[in-house]
Image: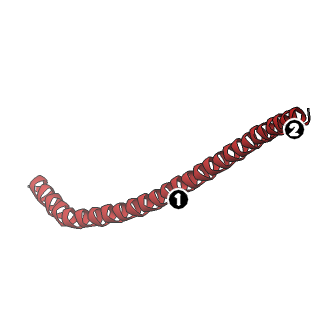
Amino acid sequence: MELIKKIKQAEADAQGIVEQAKTRAVEIAEEARKARTAAQAEAEQARRKAIDAAVAQARQEGEAEAADLKAQAETERGKLRQDTESKIQTAVETVVNYLKG
């Protein structure tokens, strides 16, 4: 009789241990899921930060390049004006002389 009681008690203890193990497994799985979610959010934030930094750098480089091209274009326009100014004066004088006769 005593042996049967001990066996039943051992079975109950084993069932309790199994239930505790299941509960702990669920808790561990939930902790792991939360950790994965947090890691994903952190990775997403880092990715967005990197993208924002790359966009800002590209914008800055683009603006600098645009300013350089604008200055270069202005310089070339000035050269063209200088080159054509003397030719325009010569052409005007030629036309005026031709019209005077």
Q: Is residue 22 left or right of 64 when viewed as pictured?
A: right
Q: Amino acid at mark 1?
A: Ala
Q: Residue at x 71, y 45 (%)?
A: 28
Q: Is residue 4 left or right of 53 when viewed as pictured?
A: right
> Residue 88 location, x and y as percent?
19, 60
Q: Are marks 1 and 2 in contact (CB under 8 Å)?
A: no
CA gap between label 1 and label 2 equals 69 Å
Considering only order in the chain, which callout, 2 or 1, is on the residue closer to the N terminus? 2
Residue 53 marker: 1
Q: Which residue is mark 2?
A: 6
Q: Residue at x 84, y 39 (%)?
A: 13
The single residue placed furthest to the front in the displayed view is: 1
Q: Amino acid at mark 2?
A: Lys
Residue 10 marker: none
Q: Quadrant of the C terminus?
A: bottom left
Q: Residue at x 87, y 38 (%)?
A: 6
